[in-house]
Amino acid sequence: MWGNTRVWRPRLVFWVGALAIGAISVGFAKLADVAQHLFQMARGSGGWTTYLPLAITPMGFVICAYMALRFFPNSQGSGIPQAIAARYLTDDDDRFRLLSLKMVAGKILLTVMGLLSGASIGREGPTVQVGASVMLQAARWGGMAHARGLILAGSAAGIAAAFNTPLAGIVFAIEEMGKSYESRANGLVLTAVILSGLAAIGFVGNYTYFGELAAATTSFSDWLLVILCGVGGGAFGACFSAGALRASRRIRRWAAFAPLSRMVLLAAICGFAVAVIGIVSGGMTFGTGYEQARGAVEGNALPWYFFLEKLLAGFLSMISGIPGGIFAPSLSVGAGFGSAVGQLIGSNIGLAAILGMAGYFAGVVQAPMTAFVIILEMTGSHNSVIALMCTAMLGYGTARIISHEPLYHSLSRVFIADAIRRKRAEMASAG
């Protein structure tokens, strides 16, 4: 057995693939940080450069949208719907249209370009598509079967490496990526998460994404915060999700007659609107929103209206058709909402921020376990575990009342439907 290459070759390729996901995720994160820094340097802190985004942002959106449609089809948006769709597809060619090494290059390049333009997007969702693509390619090189399980493992490894949240990667795989989760994929997911996490730690060390928070729910106002952040955050999250789905359907119908020209026009309009919002907000809505969210977690209150501005900027960036995720912007919106509620009732701002994140994020993705585990790991707020759980469940329950469609799974159906239409057209032409 030890000398049997047919046994060890697939395992070695799988392990190398998982390590590669960790390394690529770290590099992606560094590039994203540099891009945001360069954009902020370009717009400066005053004077005429403050208005540079009115030119830079629409132009960047146009370039990203054009390149996504022309050179990297299926790279638009978060990337999580594409990974979900690939798990449901059975044809290898259909899968490789959604997940490939070409897609890895395009997704990273265009997401970084979006951040360089000031788009309100994140890199974490794209990292899922990148991780799934790397693992699917490893499966091809290693001659491995179980493509669905490997896509699941690559997606989980991507989330784990992007946030340094190994538990959240596993929970995400079970709850969001694998609604029909196979128990035989347990070993694949766990091994991929461990190896990608080790690779990421090897490059940047062990860290907590938003720092440490020791606050606990002790008073009546703190538990009132749980209710308000859960219900309110879930409602805003559901409205974002439902609005994005509705807008996406209308945009697809509108752009069907001339996809390239109309989507590029839409990107320009959305980019200009994002630039205006960014200038009005003093630059706070540009980029991922990480700094604002971290500041709120550390106890620095955000303007009460920040979450509304960031929500709108994220919505416009999402429907524009450029590649980029909603994880980090959603956490920023949630932190802003929590901060506003915390100021209103005079509660701890740091605690309010993490509860706002849990409620809003659970409302957007309708995945309560992923919401509270990922925020728990990102903030180290072990004293608030029960409060986070309650807030995430309230956010999820509220979102289900408003919108019955989970965002990522609803968007994934578009890619599945495209694959089915393509197959039927090929069969018709062959017949």
Image (cartoon, rainbow, N blue to C red):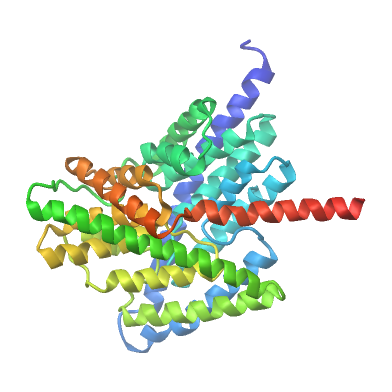
Which residue appears farthest toward the bottom when viewing the image? 48
Quarter occupied by the N terminus? top right
Side of 113 relative to 302 (left or right): right
Q: Residue 148 appears in which quarter of the rendering?
A: top right
Q: Is residue 274 visible to the viewer in this orientation of the structure? A: yes
Task: Tally the numbered discs.
Answer: 0
Q: Is residue 119 visible to the viewer in this orientation of the structure? A: no
Tell me residue 129's x, y (percent): 55, 49
Which one is in front, 261 or 20? 261
Which residue appears farthest toward the right when viewing the image? 431
Tell me residue 107's x, y (percent): 57, 57
Which one is in front, 211 or 65? 65
Image height check: is 191 above or below 350? above
Which residue appears farthest toward the left when viewing the image? 219
Tell me residue 380's x, y (percent): 24, 43
Image height check: is 88 above or below 365? above
Which one is in front, 124 or 8? 124
Which one is in front, 355 or 431? 431
- The residue located at (24%, 50%) in the rendering is 211
Tell me residue 164's x, y (percent): 37, 43
- The residue located at (38%, 47%) in the rendering is 163
Q: Residue 294 appears in which quarter of the rendering?
A: bottom left
